C-alpha cells in the first residue's frame, strides 16, 4: 500500500468513527456536515473529498460496522454450517455487536426513521441492506436444496427471523427481555421446531 | 355530561389529533409546544391547561390510540379465548391499527428513540406500556393455569411475541414482508407448535 493510500484509509476510518460518535449522540438530523468537519478538525472540502454527502457518510458507517458481521456468516456457510447454525450465529453476532457498540442501536433506529420517511439517505441504506439480502437468499436456497427448510416455509422463516432481528434492535436495552448466551440457540431451535411441525407432510 | 366537560373533552381530542399530525410529520423533537398551539389555533396557556408538557401530550397520544386495542384483547379474554387466540388477535389488531394509522409507525419509532435516550418522555411512555404489561401478565398467568402454556416457556413465549410486535413496528412498510390476513394465525400457530415441541416432557 502506498503511503498516500494508507494515510487516506486512516483518515476515512477516523471520519467514520468521529461522525458516528457525533451523530449517535446528537441525532443524524441535528448534525450538519460542517459540524462533523469541525468535530474531526478538518475543513469541509476535506470531508467532502472522502464522502459525497451525509447520505454517503451514513451508508458507510453502517457498511463498515456490518462488514465483520457478514464475514462471520459467510465463513460459517463456507465451512458447511446448517441454516439453523447460521441463524443462531447471526443472532449471536447481532447481540455481541450491540454489546460492543451500544450507540449503534440508536443509530440504526435513526436510519430506519429515514427509510420510513422515504428520504434519500434511507434509500442508500436499503442498497447496503440489499447486499445482505442477496447473501441471505443464497443461504436459504442452499438450505432448501439440502432439505433443511421446506421451500414453502421460506416466507414464514423470514418473518420469524426478521422479527428476531427487529426485536434485538428495539429491545436490546429493555429490562423486560434478556438476551443471554442461551438466547440465540434456544430461540432458533423453537423457531425451527415450529416450522418443521407446521410444514410436516 | 355538563356542557363544559363535553366541550373540554372535544378540545382535548382535537389537540391530541392535531399534535399527533404535526409531530408525526415533522418529528417530535422538531416541534415545540408553541408550534403545536399555533397549529391548533389556540394560545400556549390553553394548550398547557390540557397538557402539562410535551411529555404528557405524547403519552396521551399513545394512550388514546392504544385504548381500543387493549379493549379488544380484554373483551376476548373475558369471553374465554385461549392464549393462542388472544395472541393472534393482538397481532391482527396491530396490523389493522397500522393500516388505519400509517403515521403511527413513525410516531412509535420516535418514542422508542426517546426511551433509548433515557429521556423523561421515554419514561412516561414506559408507564403507559407497563399498564399493557400488567394486562399481558395476567393473561399469561391464566393460560398457565389452564395448561395452555408451560410455566417455563413464558420467557421464550414473550421473546417470540415481543419480536412479532417489533417486527410489525419496524417492517410494516417494508416490501420484503407481507402482513396479510393469514399472517397472524399462521405465525401464532408456528410459534405455539415450536414452544410445545421444545418444552414437551
Image (tube, coloured by chain):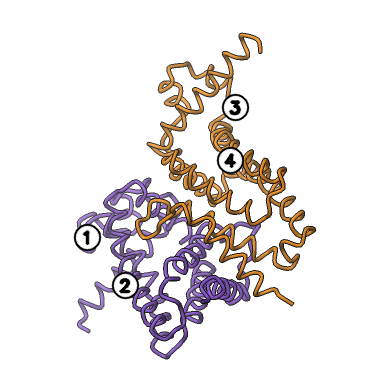
Chain colours: A orange, B purple
Residue at far front of view = B201
- Asked if disc 1 and disc 4 are in contact, CB closer than 8 Å, the reply is no
For label 2, the SS is helix
Percent x, y for residue B138?
Answer: 34, 78
Tell which subunit mark 2 falls on: B
Residue at far right of view = A145
Percent x, y for residue A156?
Answer: 64, 66
Q: CA distance from mark 3 to mark 4?
A: 25 Å
Q: Which residue is mark 2?
A: B134
Which residue is rendered at x = 48% and y = 57% of the image? A183
- Asked if disc 1 and disc 2 are in contact, CB closer than 8 Å, the reply is no
Q: Which residue is mark 3?
A: A52
Tell which subunit mark 1 falls on: B
Q: CA distance from mark 2 to mark 3?
A: 50 Å
- Asked if disc 1 and disc 3 are in contact, CB closer than 8 Å, the reply is no
Same chain? Circles 3 and 4: yes
Rendered position, A150 above or below A170: below
Q: Which residue is mark 4?
A: A69
Q: CA distance from mark 1 to mark 2?
A: 34 Å
Mark sitting on residue B46: 1
For label 1, the SS is helix
Rendered position, B130 above or below A197: above
Q: Nearer the observer, disc 2 or disc 3?
A: 2
Percent x, y for residue B149?
Answer: 46, 78
Same chain? Circles 1 and 4: no
Residue A105 falls left or right of residue A58:
left
Quadrant for the C terminus of chain A, please.
bottom right
Relative to the observer, which residue lies in front, B86 or A54? B86
Rendered position, B38 above or below B192: above
Tag 2 or tag 1, which sits nearer the N-term?
1
Amino acid at each position: 500500500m502506498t503511503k498516500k493510500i494508507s494515510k487516506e484509509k486512516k483518515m476515512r476510518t477516523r471520519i467514520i468513527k468521529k461522525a458516528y460518535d457525533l451523530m449517535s449522540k446528537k441525532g443524524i438530523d441535528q448534525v450538519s456536515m460542517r459540524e462533523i468537519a469541525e468535530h474531526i478538525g478538518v475543513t469541509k472540502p476535506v470531508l467532502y473529498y472522502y464522502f459525497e454527502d451525509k447520505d454517503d457518510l451514513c451508508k458507510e458507517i453502517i457498511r463498515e460496522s456490518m462488514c465483520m458481521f457478514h464475514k462471520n456468516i459467510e465463513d460459517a456457510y463456507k465451512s458447511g454450517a446448517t441454516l439453523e447454525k447460521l441463524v443462531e450465529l447471526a443472532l449471536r453476532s447481532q447481540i455481541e455487536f450491540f454489546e460492543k457498540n451500544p450507540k449503534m442501536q440508536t443509530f440504526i433506529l435513526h436510519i430506519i426513521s429515514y427509510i420510513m420517511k422515504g428520504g434519500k439517505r434511507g434509500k442508500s441504506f436499503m442498497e447496503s441492506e440489499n447486499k445482505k439480502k442477496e447473501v441471505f437468499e443464497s443461504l436459504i436456497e442452499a438450505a432448501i436444496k439440502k432439505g433443511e427448510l421446506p421451500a414453502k416455509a421460506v416466507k414464514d422463516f423470514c418473518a420469524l427471523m426478521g422479527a428476531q432481528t427487529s426485536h434485538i434492535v428495539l429491545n436490546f436495552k429493555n429490562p423486560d427481555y434478556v438476551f443471554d448466551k442461551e438466547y440465540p440457540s434456544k430461540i432458533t431451535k423453537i423457531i425451527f421446531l415450529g416450522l418443521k411441525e407446521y410444514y410436516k407432510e
